[in-house]
Image: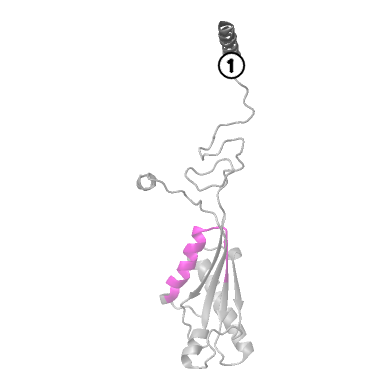
């Protein structure tokens, strides 16, 4: 009886082993495309944004991240009394905005003109509009920024930043603000241990 049990156990084990053997006569059919055509680490079956720049930071579908730009900056430009002329020493202030807009070609700028509380509202409204327009004209004529990407708005003395009424307050309130909005079209790049070497090539 003892030997009979041993023989049955050996037969069962051998039969199981034979059933576990699978012979592949032909390649297994793959239902999904596992290639990575743009080498961004996302397989073609999942890819939604083919042609990603090599090394760009992407989401799970191979698409680069779009970053909104919302940049507001006061331009340190001093105008002569009742004048909208921008003196050459202030061109560098305007150039900073031009560089930002050239770096991000999908951006748009609104130039705001503001005045101090001196003179009539109507006079300051016209003057603040002229000063804002002078900045957009300088961006267009000297820094090659398309006029369609700019607008000028005068606010007279509707939006003071200092209401103390001192001469210093009046100077602070006579200002020009550049508000740049749009999308960052430059690819956000992932950094790795080889990035510095790649940039130096």
User: x, y (%) of residue 6?
Assistant: 56, 9
Indicate whether 128 appears above or below 194: below
Residue 199 or residue 33, whichever sits in front: 33
Indicate whether 92 appears above or below 60: below
Say which residue appears at 48% left-offset and 87% top-offset.
Answer: 171
Say which residue appears at 49% left-offset and 85% top-offset.
Answer: 172
Farthest front residue in view: 1
Say which residue appears at 43% left-offset and 71% top-offset.
Answer: 92
Quarter holding residue 50: top right
125 vs 92, left or right, is right
Indicate whether 163 appears above or below 4: below
The colour scheme used here is: one colour
| Membership of 111 in magenta stretch | no
- The secondary element bearing badge 1 is classed as loop
User: x, y (%) of residue 20?
Assistant: 59, 16
User: x, y (%) of residue 79?
Assistant: 48, 83
Quarter holding residue 185: bottom right
27 vs 76, left or right, is right
Residue topped by disc 1: 20
User: x, y (%) of residue 120?
Assistant: 61, 92
Indicate whether 84 appears above or below 45: below
Circle count: 1
Say which residue appears at 61% left-offset and 13% top-offset.
Answer: 19
Residue 3 or residue 47, whichever sits in front: 3
Predominant SS along the magenta part: helix
Q: Quadrant of the C terminus?
A: top left
Which stretch is magenta?
90-110
**Label 1 environment density (alpha carbons within 10 Å; few <14, some 14–19, many ≥20):** few
Q: Quadrant of the N terminus?
A: top right
């Amino acid at each position: 009886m003892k030997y009979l049990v041993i023989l049955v156990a050996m037969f069962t084990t051998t039969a199981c082993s034979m059933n576990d053997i699978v012979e592949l006569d032909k390649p297994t059919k793959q239902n999904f495309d596992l290639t990575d055509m743009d080498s961004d680490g996302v397989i073609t079956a999942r890819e939604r944004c083919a042609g990603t720049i090599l090394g760009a930071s992407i989401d799970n579908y191979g698409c680069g991240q779009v970053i909104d730009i919302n940049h507001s900056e006061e331009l340190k430009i001093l105008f002569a009394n009742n004048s909208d002329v921008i003196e050459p020493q202030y061109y560098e202030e305007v150039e900073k905005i031009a560089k930002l807009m050239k770096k991000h070609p999908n951006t748009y700028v609104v130039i705001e003109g503001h005045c101090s509380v001196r003179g009539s509202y109507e006079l300051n409204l016209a003057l603040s509009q002229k000063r804002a327009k002078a900045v957009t004209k300088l961006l267009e004529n000297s820094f090659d920024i398309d006029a369609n990407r700019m607008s000028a708005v005068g606010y007279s003395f509707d939006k003071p930043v200092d209401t103390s009424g001192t001469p210093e307050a009046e100077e602070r309130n006579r200002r020009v603000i550049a508000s740049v909005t749009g999308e960052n079209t430059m690819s956000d790049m992932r950094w790795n241990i080889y990035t510095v070497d790649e940039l130096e090539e």
